[in-house]
Image (cartoon, helix red, strand yellow):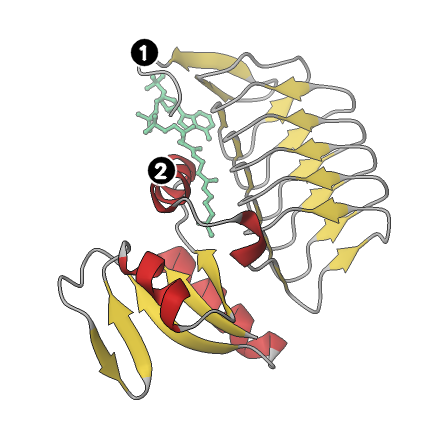
Amino acid sequence: MKIAIIGQGGHSKVVRDLIKTIGEVEIVGCLDDQYNAEFYREQVFYGPVDAARTFTEDFPDVRFFVAVGNNRVRKQIVERLGIPDALYATLIHPTAHISSSTSIGPGSVVMPCAVINTDVQVGAHAIINTCAVVEHDSLVANYAHVSPNATLTGNVMVREGAQIGASATVIPGKEIGKWTIVGAGATVIDDIPPYCTAVGVPAMVKTKEITGGV
Ligand SMILES: CC(=O)SCCNC(=O)CCNC(=O)[C@H](O)C(C)(C)COP(=O)(O)OP(=O)(O)OC[C@H]1O[C@@H](n2cnc3c(N)ncnc32)[C@H](O)[C@@H]1OP(=O)(O)O
């Protein structure tokens, strides 16, 4: 598979490393708004994000991956490009355990040693980060991020764009509202509303966002 990576920050570095590990995937494009001109270096195309549209015409077999860690920015880029879902790659590290009954949407990545158990749904452009555990019947919706070492126990619903911070735990059956951030190390024992930040053990709502979602 040939792939064009969108975004050149820290998350992108890890994604490119994962791609090397997978093998059989060749990076043919690096797109980021830090490039204001289009050019080739060592047979790899570099250019601004919007070059992705013309890229699909020149290289119809290329798949795209938005490797931007910020959930909101990732969504904004996907919406701005309007590329069909089928042209996004789904990337899974070979050390991740994924149940055969799990579905993972386009543009999502599963990092090393993550475990995604039975009947989980992972939406599009989501991140299941290093050593995260997503237990049975849970949902990780579009643009959500389960950070390194976080644990979603059974039947947990993580709504669109929400982030579960590193090493946080959500007990069974709880819902994390869309675009909410659960702080690192939190233990969630109640539903958390959308558009807020919740921290601590047990997790309490700390700040209500005034900006809303994307
Ligand atoms: C590979 C990767 O890097 S993947 C990325 C993984 N990233 C993470 O896990 C980061 C998760 N983010 C956090 O935990 C952040 O601290 C957030 C989002 C919860 C809060 O960030 P900010 O909005 O910048 O809050 P800020 O640092 O100003 O702290 C606000 C208050 O919350 C407290 N607080 C912040 N984070 C936490 C936390 N994780 N647990 C407990 N309390 C916290 C602060 O002590 C402060 O308390 P005070 O008002 O009593 O002084």
Q: Residue at x 52, y 29 (%)?
A: 162
- Specify whether 47 is left or right of 71: left
Give x and y (percent) for residue 87: 53, 57
Counting from the top left corner in percent of width and height, residue 21 is at 59, 77
| Residue 165 seen | yes
Count all numbered tags in the image, as a single digit: 2
Which residue corresponds to the image point at 53% horizontal and 72% vertical from the top-left? 19
Q: Position of residue 89 (x, y in %)?
A: 56, 60
**Above-or-below relation of 100 to 156:** below
Q: Amino acid at mark 1?
A: Ile
Amino acid marked by disc 2:
Gln
Quarter containing the N terminus: bottom right
Query: Image quadrant of residue 140?
Result: top right
Q: Which of disc 1 and disc 2 is earlier in sequence?
A: 2
Q: Quadrant of the C terminus?
A: top left
Q: Residues within 10 Å of mark 2 (few under 14, many from 20)?
A: few
Is label 2 in a helix, a strand or a loop? Answer: helix
Residue that extends furthest to the bottom in the rendered view of this protein: 42
Q: For this view, does 168 lie left or right of residue 174?
A: left
Residue 73: x, y in percent? 35, 40
Is residue 7 toward the left or the right of residue 150 in the image? Answer: left
The numbered mark at residue 210 is: 1
Q: Nearer the viewer, mark 2 or mark 1?
A: 2
Residue annotated with mark 2: 76
Query: Compared to 70, does 3 lie above or below?
Result: below
Marks 2 and 1 sit apart, C-alpha to C-alpha, by: 19 Å
Q: Quadrant of ligand 1?
A: top left
113 or 35: nearer the viewer: 35
